[in-house]
Image (cartoon, rainbow, N blue to C red):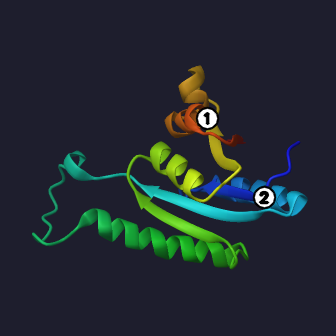
Amino acid sequence: MNDYSHILVALDFSPDNERIIQRAKQLARQNGAKLSLIHVVEPVGLAYAGEIPFPENFDLEQHISEQAELRMESFRQRHELAEARYFVEIGSPKHEIIRVAQEQGVDLILLGSHGRRGLQLLLGATANGVLHMAECDVLAVRVR
């Protein structure tokens, strides 16, 4: 096993994150590594065709991002990760995870994978994209 110094943990705020963060904390302890957390808000844009009218100046992505910041802070406190830096980004999850990992000098990305059908469904679109694009190691933790 490699010695890791900086682990980036991708979170989606699902119940699966409990298993992922426990694995990340274990690896951080074993390697003396620092942890960083990331959550990516996917752009709403044209995908939203809802019937709820929003005021003209209401930025839905910004609102979702602010809510994610609050959830991330709560997650950090609940898991006693006050020293962990966190990132809430807007964009394509796989691209933002890779970008932040490169900018922060991460040497391991940790995220969840799902057991379904086929390679992309086995890992999930985000995990599969990160696995193929990352310049560092990627650990996909089996969830569900």
Question: Looking at the picture, how far across and down is residue 20, in whole percent?
Answer: 70, 53
126 lies left or right of 2: left
Q: Is residue 26 left or right of residue 37?
A: right
Which image quadrant is residue 74 in? bottom right
- Of the residues tagged 2 and 1, which is closer to the observer? 2
Tell me what residue is drawn at x 55 percent, y 28 percent. Answer: 121
Q: The residue under label 1 is which amino acid type?
A: Leu
The residue wearing badge 1 is: 131
72 over 125 or under it: above or below: below
Q: Is residue 54 left or right of residue 43?
A: left
For residue 13, above or below residue 144:
below
Query: Residue drawn 52% across and 65% down?
Result: 87
Q: Residue 96 at what x, y percent from top left?
A: 47, 51
**Considering the image in quadrants, where does the N terminus appear?**
top right
| Quarter of the rendering occupied by the C terminus | top right
Tell me the number on the disc at residue 5: 2
Q: Amino acid at mark 2?
A: Ser
